[in-house]
Amino acid sequence: MTVQSRVAGVFLLLVVSTTAAGAADVFVVGGLSLNSTADDVRRLYPHSLIKDHHVEVLDQDVRENIWAIELPRPGESRRLRGFFERLTEHGATYPPCEQVLASIQRKYGTPANVQEFAEEQAWNRRHIWPRGGEVLTLLCFRLGRGALSASEITIAPR
């Protein structure tokens, strides 16, 4: 075994061991995690409007196409939700599901489960990534025959 291959092996082991525990078990969306606080939001979204546990994200603060955030509340139903709906003078717009999905897959890999179902007039697809003590869910929808649009993303305890 050459010195270069030993160094590469040690580097690979270091990468695997630092991502296998801790940080890899926590999902982050728009710079926020399930443990984020209003202070974190004020730092990351300084121009946005914060009221109680809801954040209206203003144009200059938008990250990852998220236009509204619901911060986690204490208790069993604790969750962080990001909403992709953007209200404009022409109505609501949403980013393509495939675009948002590709971004999430680059960070967290292929979803462990995909569920499809009809609800009222919409066809829905829910992509689910469980990891550690959390689960990340991307909800997409389609009205009619068009492409799927991203609706919301949620981080919740497992």
Image: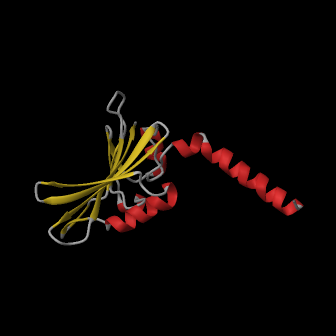
- Residue nearest the observer in this picture, 101 or 83: 101
Residue 156: image location, x then y, percent: 38, 39
Choose between 93 and 76: the one closer to the eye.
Answer: 76
Among the 4 quarters of the image, the one containing residue 140? bottom left
Residue pictured at 36% horizontal, 39% vertical: 79
| Residue found farthest to the left | 120
Residue 58 is situated, as x and y percent measured from the top left of the image, at: 35, 58
Percent from the top left, x then y, of residue 42?
A: 44, 45
Number of labelled discs? 0
Q: Position of 65 compared to 92: left or right? A: right
Between 122 and 5, the one lying in front of the other is: 5
Q: Which picture quadrant has residue 139?
A: bottom left
Q: Quadrant of the N terminus?
A: bottom right
Task: Locate the C terminus and report the quarter of the image it occupies.
Answer: top left
Q: Residue furthest front?
A: 1
Query: Which residue is painted at 61% across and 44% down in the image?
Result: 20
> Residue 5 at x, y = what percent?
82, 61
Q: Is residue 21 above or below residue 113?
A: above
Colouring scheme applied when the structure was drawn: secondary structure
Q: Residue at x 46, y 47 (%)?
A: 32
